[in-house]
Image (cartoon, helix red, strand yellow):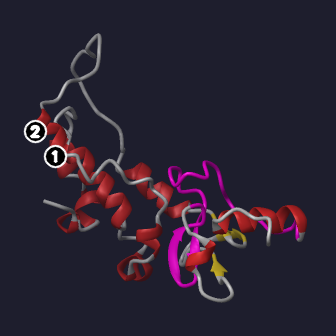
Amino acid sequence: MDQCGPMVLDALIKIKNEIDSSLTFRRSCREGVCGSCAMNIDGTNTLACTKFIADVKGDIKIYPLPHMPVVARPGARPHRTLAQLASIEPWLKSTTQAPTRERLQSPEERAKLDGLWECILCFCCTTSCPSYWWAGERYLGPAVLLQAYRWLADSRDEAAGERSTSSRIRSGSIAATPS
């Protein structure tokens, strides 16, 4: 591993290319933007592309994200989580005519979205959540609830009433989201 990049993802790619071509994992951007390389590294759910090899003492232990269906180790495919995300309809809803340019917000309205839109949906938080472990079929989990609240807080979205009364969101403990 002398000629390897500094990240755990670099080591995985090197192992796959030079040692064991049967090793399977998901990756895409290598920049901590897409969330594809989310896995459990030394007991912590994290992104392999942002985890430095030097930060790990001793042998590196890599596992799939907990409570996710495994397609091939250490990659996990988030079936249920993506279906749950789709159930909240995470897109702008509007019944008014689309403007010729973007839908504008005041700086104050925009500030309400800070901390909500940055989530890359890697589901590391969701797979670390005991409530999701115990009731994942019924509980949406932190990542999906954050996205649900993101659209409730967006001043450009015209479906806030419809969204806030959605039984799917209410049963997902919407009260656990930021105020």
Categorize mark 2 by other alpha carbons within 10 Å: few (<14), some (14-19), many (20+). Answer: few
Q: Which mark is residue 108?
A: 2
Q: Position of residue 178 (x, y in %)?
A: 18, 61
**Quarter assignment of residue 133:** bottom left
Q: Kindly indicate whether the residue at mark 2 contacts the one at mark 1 (C-beta within 8 angstroms).
A: yes
Q: Which of 14 and 164 lies nearest the eye of the viewer?
A: 14
For the residues marked 1 and 2, what is the alpha-carbon distance in whole angstroms? 7 Å
Q: Amino acid at mark 1?
A: Lys
Q: Position of residue 135 (x, y in %)?
A: 39, 78
Q: What residue sits 39% from the left and 51% below the top?
A: 87
Please report the bounds of the magenta region as a residue range: 20-49
Query: Pointer 1: what residue?
Result: 112
Q: Which of 133 and 3 lies nearest the eye of the viewer?
A: 3
Q: What residue sits 30% from the left and 60% below the top?
A: 145
Dominant secondary structure, magenta: loop
Secondary structure category for the residue under label 1: loop
Q: Going by the picture, which residue comes out furthest to the front? A: 2
Secondary structure category for the residue under label 2: helix
Q: Position of residue 33 (x, y in %)?
A: 50, 50
**Quarter assignment of residue 18:** bottom right
Q: Position of residue 144 (x, y in %)?
A: 36, 58
